[in-house]
Image: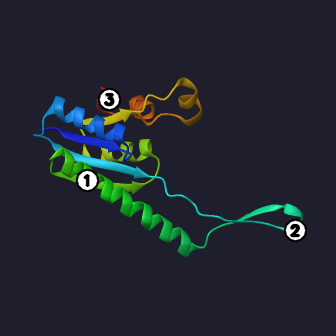
Amino acid sequence: MAKVLIGTDGSDASTAAAEKALQLLGKSHQFLILEAVHVPVPLAVGSLGGGVPYALPPSPELLLEASKAVMVEAEADIAALSHRLGVNARLVAEPGGAADVIRRLVEENAIDLVVVGSHGKGLASRVMLGSVSHDVLKDLPCPVLVVPVGS
């Protein structure tokens, strides 16, 4: 029985990737479903005299509130995915960059296989924004199954 980490971002593409992976692998494995969460930083924006824009950093309370809301949504996403896949999985929602969180969890949990989807971004998007699937392929100590959109 392998330990399989399924990375998701809550999108239809990542759900389809997870479903395809289960078709290929079967359900007799230990699954960890991960959503790495980017917590937005809410700013108070306004304009000074003469139309000069400004942005104020958020209060610690506002940051905490934003963080909690995003984490609750991520936890609901991965619970729904686990239910849809019909697997009993360990569910993890964590703040941070997806590739970094995946790397850490692979090491901490002795993961045997990582499954991620590919959104099929064009070259320009990959160069500007990067790609989680590309980032995890570079240096994980285990195999990575990248499921392209539409597979």
* Residue 139 horizontal/vertical position (percent): 40, 32
Q: Disc 2 or 3, which lies upstream in sequence?
A: 2
Check disc 2 and report the residue beneath it: 49
Check disc 1 and report the residue beneath it: 80
* Residue 58 horizontal/vertical position (percent): 62, 69
Q: Residue furthest right?
A: 50
Please say which color scheme the image uses: rainbow
Give above or below for 18 relative to 126.
below
Element on which disc 2 rests? helix
Q: Disc 3 or 1, which lies upstream in sequence?
A: 1
Rate crowding at label 3 as few (under 14), some (14 to 19) or many (20 or more) other CA atoms within 10 Å: many
* Residue 130 horizontal/vertical position (percent): 52, 34
Residue type, label 1: Ala
Viewed as shown, does residue 120 lie left or right of 5?
Answer: right
Viewed as shown, does residue 37 lie left or right of 151?
Answer: right
Q: Disc 1 or 2, which lies upstream in sequence?
A: 2
